[in-house]
Structures are given as structure tokens and as C-alpha cells.
Image (spheres, rainbow, N blue to C red):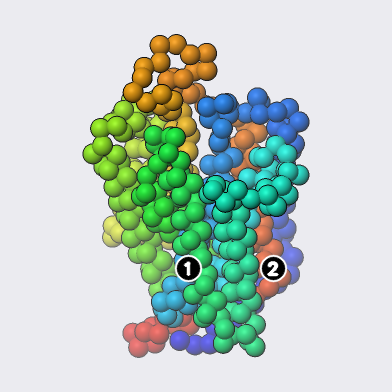
């Protein structure tokens, strides 16, 4: 493989400024939505005493999980020594940091009192998984930043492999922590499962890679830089495997629940008679977010088309958001068993009743602002630093391309 040359985005084209303007507008609108909810109170949202995590949390968790997965491309090159992935490592690291920052921005703004974040960062309850997650998030930021520094600074190159191993291990721990938020919540019948942690890790692989592929293809299309079929072919096959693995782990989660009689009612709610939740699960995650993308990336009629590859990536992202929505909102909507072994005859607190939730516009706009934060960090990052290779043509990145020619 030839020596890879990197360069910043040159000039201030109208297209580049337009992208900055659109992303900036999305962020400003999201900040306005956060300001509105902070001053009016959460009654203007769809959240309630039963559903305390709403649409902003769906976006935040999705972005945080995807951040871990976006680093996967860099890890394959550094940890597993695959040379074709090494030129992509810088963009992979940048996207991982940006997605995590976008997710955390949504979480902070949804606190209602963002200024109280300092309390959460200085007063710890180590019996809570949320306290541990603060260390996991900040640790990920620091380790990936150091990883990028060692990767991009010639004098530090000899340490970058060690940093790559550390980033790989930390990203697994990070996503384990995110999945464990649900796995450790014994009060909710839909959570409380050990498979949540590995399931979130595998889902992060597909969510993060789908976003990475869209960002990669869009960047090279707009910058008119060569992007060969060899790189996209590897990423496409990897995406199909990750999507299949995520679908498998979700199936294991539900089949395990179905084995235990105590979870039968919850599974019936999520898979059959729970209203919007079975529809989102089967239609959104299983069909649109899993089966269709696998057909598009593996069937010969579609697999050679970059357009269909982009569609497959977008469907994985849509399916991922749907799956997080089903897990998060559906798990809260299903009533908690407050008094096991007893039947509640009546309650003024809606005990035993399925909670309703309709996301409000401000919630959606705040979530989209997190996406805007992540993307604008990438757009600015590739402008000021050398994250993107000059070329990813087959003859530049594929050691076998010259021999084939």
C-alpha cells in the first residue's frame, strides 16, 4: 500500500458554507427548544411521572452508542492490523468524538437545570451506574483524543498502537456501561437483563458503521476525491455482518424473556398487543432497519450500487433509532409491578396502567440539535486538521489492486 497523504478541506466554497449554515441553524433551533422546555417545565413535553426519559434521550443514547461503534473502523486497522482500514482511522476517531459530544449535549440540555451538571460531576454515588458513566464518557473523550494525537503527530507515532488498544478496550467498557443502565434496572420488567450490555455493544457496531459510511461517502462526493470500490466493499460486507449480529442479539433477548413466565406479559406487550411498540419493533427495526439493509448490501442486484449502499446505511440508522425508542419508551410505558404477588384494585397514581407518551416538537428539535452538534464538529474538524486522505482509490489503499491490474 502506498504512503497515505492527508489534507484539510481547502477554501471556503459556497457548498461548505451552506452546510455550516444549515447545521448551525439546526443547533440554534434545538437550543431554542431546550430554552423553551427549561422555562416552561417538562409539562410541555410528552414525558410524565411514568415516562421520564423521552425523545431527547432516544437521540442521546443512540448518538452515544453510535460513537463507540464509529471508532470500530480505527480499531480494525490498529488492533487487528488490517491495512485497508488504517487510512480511515483519523476520520473514525473524529466521528466517534463528535457523536459522543452530540449525545452528551442533548443529555445536558434535557436536565432542565444544565448548571446542576457540576453537582453530578462532583458528587458521586458509586452504587449508581450513572455515576460510573460520567467517568466512562470523559475517559473515552480523553483516550480517543490522545489516540488521534499519537496517530497524527509523527513524533508520537510509535505510541499510537498502544493508544489504539486502550481506546478499543475503553469503547467496549463504555458501551457496556450504557447497556448496563438498562440491564441493572430491576424495577422495569423490560430491562433487567444481562444480555443488554453485549446487545448494546453489537448494536453500536452497526449504528456507528452506518453513520461512518454515510459521512465517508458524502465527504468524498462533495470534495470530489477518489473513493475506490475496495474500501466500500469491505465496509459494506462488515455492515451486513454487524446488522445480522445485532438482529441476532435482539432475538436472543426476546427469546430468553419468553422462556421465563414472569416476562410473558411484557413480551406480549412489546411484540403483539402493545400498540405502537410492536409496529415500531417489527416494521421499524426488524424489517426496515435489519432485513432490508442486509438485502441491499448482499443481493447482487443492489450490492454494487453506491446509492443503494447509502440507502442501506440510512435504513440502519432509522432502524437503530426505532430500536432505541422501543427499548427506552416501551420499557417505561409498560407498568411496573409495584407489589409483586398482589393485585392493585385501584390507584390514583396510574399503577398497573400502560403509560401514554407522544413526543413533542421541542423534544424532537433538541434531539436533532445533538445530531447537528456531531456533524458540525466533523465538518469543522476536516476543515482545520488533516483527517481525510487525499485519495482512497483502490490502487492507493488496496495492497492487491496493483497485482489484480
Q: Is residue 370 left or right of residue 336?
A: right
Q: Where is residue 58 in the image (x, y as percent from the top left)?
A: 53, 42
Q: Compared with residue 55, is residue 370 higher up or lower down, i.e. above or below?
A: below
Total marks in image: 2
Residue nearest the observer in this picture, 128 or 210: 128
Query: Which quadrant, please, contains the C terminus?
Result: bottom left
Residue drawn 56% across the image and 44% down it: 59
Q: Is mark 2 on a helix, strand or loop?
A: helix
Q: In this view, does 201 lie to the left or right of 93?
A: left
Give the residue at the far left of this rendering: 259
User: Of callouts 1 and 2, which one flags the residue occurring earlier in the amino acid sequence?
Assistant: 1
Residue drawn 40% across the image and 73% down it: 230
Q: Is mark 1 on a helix, strand or loop?
A: helix
Residue drawn 60% across the image and 37% down it: 364
Residue nearest the observer in this picture, 3 or 35: 35
Q: Where is residue 175 in the image (x, y as percent from the top left)?
A: 48, 56
Instruction: Classify mark 2: residues with Cα within 10 Å, few (<14), some (14-19) or many (20+).
Output: some
Q: Where is residue 97 in the image (x, y as percent from the top left)?
A: 60, 62
> Which residue in the protein does label 1 denote?
169
Q: How far apart are marks 1 and 2 (CA)?
A: 29 Å
Q: Position of residue 16 (x, y in %)?
A: 69, 60
Residue drawn 45% across the image and 11% down it: 346
> Which residue in the protein does label 2 denote?
383
Amino acid at each position: 500500500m502506498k504512503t497515505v497523504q492527508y489534507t484539510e478541506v481547502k477554501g471556503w466554497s459556497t457548498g461548505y458554507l451552506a452546510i455550516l449554515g444549515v447545521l448551525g441553524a439546526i443547533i440554534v433551533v434545538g437550543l431554542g427548544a431546550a430554552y423553551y422546555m427549561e422555562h416552561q417545565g417538562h409539562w410541555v413535553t410528552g414525558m410524565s411521572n411514568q415516562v421520564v426519559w423521552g425523545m431527547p434521550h432516544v437521540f442521546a443514547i443512540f448518538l452515544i452508542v453510535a460513537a463507540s461503534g464509529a471508532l470500530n473502523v480505527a480499531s480494525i486497522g490498529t488492533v487487528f492490523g488490517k491495512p485497508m482500514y488504517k487510512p480511515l482511522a483519523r476520520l473514525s476517531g473524529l466521528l466517534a468524538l463528535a457523536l459522543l459530544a452530540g449525545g452528551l449535549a442533548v443529555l445536558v440540555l434535557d436536565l432542565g437545570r444544565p448548571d446542576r451538571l457540576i453537582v453530578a460531576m462532583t458528587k458521586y454515588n458509586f452504587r449508581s451506574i450513572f455515576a460510573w458513566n460520567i467517568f466512562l464518557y470523559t475517559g473515552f473523550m480523553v483516550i480517543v483524543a490522545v489516540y488521534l494525537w499519537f496517530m497524527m503527530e509523527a513524533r508520537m507515532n510509535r505510541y499510537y498502537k498502544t493508544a489504539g488498544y486502550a481506546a478499543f478496550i475503553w469503547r467496549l467498557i463504555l458501551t457496556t456501561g450504557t447497556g448496563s443502565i438498562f440491564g441493572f434496572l430491576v424495577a422495569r420488567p423490560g430491562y433487567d437483563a444481562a444480555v443488554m450490555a453485549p446487545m448494546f455493544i453489537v448494536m453500536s457496531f452497526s449504528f456507528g458503521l452506518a453513520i461512518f459510511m454515510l459521512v465517508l461517502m458524502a465527504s468524498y462526493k462533495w470534495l470530489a476525491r477518489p473513493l475506490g470500490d475496495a474500501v466500500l466493499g469491505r465496509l459494506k460486507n462488515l455492515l451486513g455482518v454487524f446488522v445480522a449480529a445485532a438482529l441476532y442479539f435482539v432475538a436472543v433477548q426476546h427469546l430468553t424473556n419468553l422462556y421465563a413466565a414472569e416476562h410473558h406479559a411484557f413480551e406480549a406487550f412489546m411484540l403483539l398487543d402493545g400498540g405502537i411498540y410492536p409496529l415500531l419493533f417489527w416494521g421499524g427495526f426488524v424489517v426496515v432497519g435489519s432485513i432490508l439493509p442486509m438485502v441491499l448490501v448482499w443481493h447482487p442486484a443492489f450490492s454494487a450500487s453506491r446509492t443503494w449502499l447509502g440507502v442501506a446505511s440510512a435504513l440502519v440508522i432509522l432502524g437503530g433509532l426505532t430500536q432505541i425508542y422501543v427499548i427506552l419508551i416501551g420499557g417505561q410505558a409498560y407498568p411496573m409491578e409495584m407489589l409483586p404477588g398482589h393485585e392493585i384494585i385501584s390507584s390514583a397514581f396510574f399503577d398497573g396502567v400502560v403509560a401514554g407518551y407522544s413526543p413533542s416538537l421541542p423534544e424532537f428539535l433538541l434531539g436533532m440539535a445533538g445530531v447537528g452538534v456531531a456533524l458540525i464538529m466533523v465538518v469543522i474538524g476536516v476543515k482545520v486538521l488533516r483527517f481525510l486522505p487525499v485519495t482512497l482509490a483502490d490502487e492507493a489503499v488496496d495492497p492487491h489492486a496493483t497485482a489484480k491490474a
